[in-house]
Image: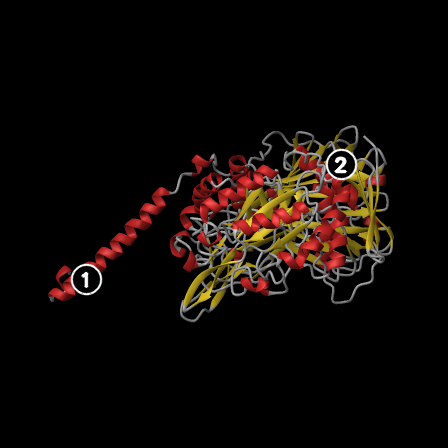
Amino acid sequence: MLKRIWPTRVRHRTLFGLLLIVLLGSSALWIARLDRLPPLSELGIGAPPEPGAAVAQGAAWDPPAARADGFAPVAENEAFALYIDPETSRIAVENKRSGFLWRGNPSAEELGAETAAGLLKENLQSPFVLEYILGTNTRRIQSNALDPKVDATFAAVENGVQVTYDYGELGLSFVVQYAITEEGFEAVVPEAGIREDGEAKLFSLSVLPYFGAVSGTKEDGYLFVPDGPGGLIPYDASRPASVKGYEFPIYGSDPSHLKEGSRGPRREPIRFPVYGLVRGDQAYAAIVKDGKHNATVRALPAGVSSTFHSVGVAFTYREEYGRKVSGLSGETVKTIEEDRVKADRRIEFRLLEGEEADYVGMAHAYRRYLEENGALGGRLEPVEHVPMQLSIIGGGAKPRFGGYGYEAATTFREAESIVEQLTDGGVSNLVVTVQGWQRSGRGETDRRLPVAKELGGAEGAKRFADAMRAKGFPVWFEDYIGWKQPDHTDFSMRSDGVRAIDSTVLQGRFRLDESFAIVPGRLGDFIVQPTKAIRAQKEIVDALKASGASGIHYVDGPGNLLFSDYTPSARLSRADTAFYYEALLAYTRESLGGVGVVRGNDYALEHADLVESLPFESNYDFVVEETVPFYPIAVHGYVAYTTVPGNLRSDYDADFLKAIEYGAVPFFRVTHAPSRALMDTDYEDVYSSEFAVWKDRMLEEYAAFDRLSSIVHQRIEDHERVAEGVYATTYEDGTRVVVDYRAGGFQVEEGGAE
């Protein structure tokens, strides 16, 4: 065989030998590069945690005597009492302070007027709705607690009860645990309690999908959904017949699942896992704690599937996808993945009353949850002047003479001049982020070092950072660790790229657009496996530290991009990816002192010092009637955040006022050169950036924002609509900021409370 391969002519042998040397050399370099990547342990990063919820194995729970409505007492504390109906496994929770009884399902009296029939009406009477499949069949079969195939048994757990639902003939069973808490109760589906011994496989599970459901317009209130910064669906609103409700995944669609729907209208993905409901002077905030990475929020106004308004969450255990039949034709067949996502599922319901029974009270409840779990980091320090977030774009690669060349838009000396002019004009507090500093002139690249010589190189970067430090201004450098362009990376698409659910490399199908929504991407772009990207990050952190950097601002990855990785030897769930991204933020902050993200998925909040472009607009769905600042209320005073850059607003005045209303800090993205210098670069979407053009407006706007310097570190205590187009935001010390969109201005009513 060797004789057949080896050429017979001397010239051919020489060429063949040279080719082998090149191939072997390239392979050796590639292998050596992999060997040079430090282990995660060197960055202080371990493995993701395993599911930990335990399943009760003790004696059966013996229910006490039931009340007249069929509910038997389970557990209680000073504030709440938990009940369950042993005949139906439906639950109820009493708020002992107000006497209000929250039901897991509508009462028999309320269901008497229900027009839905069959399975839809059964679902209204069940504490869960299940979807399962049989064998290789992709048809999903829906079931609930009224299904004659299922038996329910009960066991006692601490402060609650465990219900085991067993589909005996299907070999399928799962467990739901309910436990009373200081602020309400929890519902838990332990991974350890799932059994799949037959053909039946769990596809999805909704727990308490009708908790607190409201009939028609009998009560005042609304459903709350995590749309944009927060969205309300009032009970009394009139809607087009085409409205089918609200149903979207937390943290957006997983690009690895290859959903065709990802090519639909661009959406702002859900950034925080909370939903809720208000009925009169009672409300609840439901926080999806475990399993949130594979969950979908569903809100159904009355008239969509029943006469009730309801909101809940569906946990996904398996995904449906198109498996390729042939690599030539591209034809696919529907397939459901074999393995389920192994994770506990947990929802905490925080029950509210009186003045707290609205979206502000829900945001406070979520904030308390984040505080209690250390998910917000520390409080911001008081400042004398509001911090301006200033992004300076160095430049980028653009087509030049049949290739690409770096074109500088702002050198480090010019950047220093920009800062000098701002400080001379009265800007006293700045956080500077340098963009477009990479030698390759690309954003989505790992070919970053050394710093582009056209800007001043590493020496220029250090000189600039030192000059800024002398003024008390931190300097961050932007970075990308998600998507990569194959022509501008040392990673191998085949070996290092994330694998999609169909086992192919996830390339060029979807990516983030300028508003960080998932959209169709460039053919060939791919996402680097998170663990490899993070291991390679140590070199960048060390190099930037040597250049005097005070932090890294991650444009894509930790704050806005979440996906699964189906690489056989290193499979990751979305929860695993979030874990590694959180660990990277912690490492970066510990090493450099600061770290920023874009958009701000809630799991990034603990370690982030800045969230750039926190969502401040809804997706303008017909079903969502009003947008509210739920997310800003929850995080203000713990992490600084911006809206869009001031020089890139679609409606300058309205967007400026929105930033004031929502408690954001000022933000501009500029260059020294005219913005045409960015044409045909990775920054060409920055269509108006020349500092000389924007300088006066920046100084004017900073002076306006600086009126709010005393409340930068404070929590938001209230938010209300005072009149049409007029909104008031109240802070801890009583300061009230009133924004009037009609008049185009705002007023600050100073507080004074300690």
Q: Is residue 250 above or below residue 15?
A: above
What is the CA distance from the residue labelled 2 to the residue labelled 1? 79 Å
> Left of 358 or right of it: where is 13?
left
- Picture coordinates of residue 526 (x, y %)? 46, 57
> Left of 29 or right of it: where is 266?
right
Q: Give the quadrant of residue 60.
A: top right
Q: Residue 83, labelled with which disc?
A: 2
Q: Residues within 10 Å of mark 1 (few under 14, many from 20)?
A: some
Q: Residue 534, labelled with which disc?
A: none
Using the rendered image of the protein, determine whether residue 91 is visible from the camera's viewpoint: no
Q: Residue at x 78, y 66 (%)?
A: 240
State the residue in front, 67 or 638. 638
Q: Give the quadrant of residue 57.
A: top right
Q: Secondary structure at mark 2?
A: strand
Q: Residue 16, labelled with which disc?
A: 1
Q: Is residue 136 above or below residue 368?
A: below
State the residue in front, 600 or 554. 554
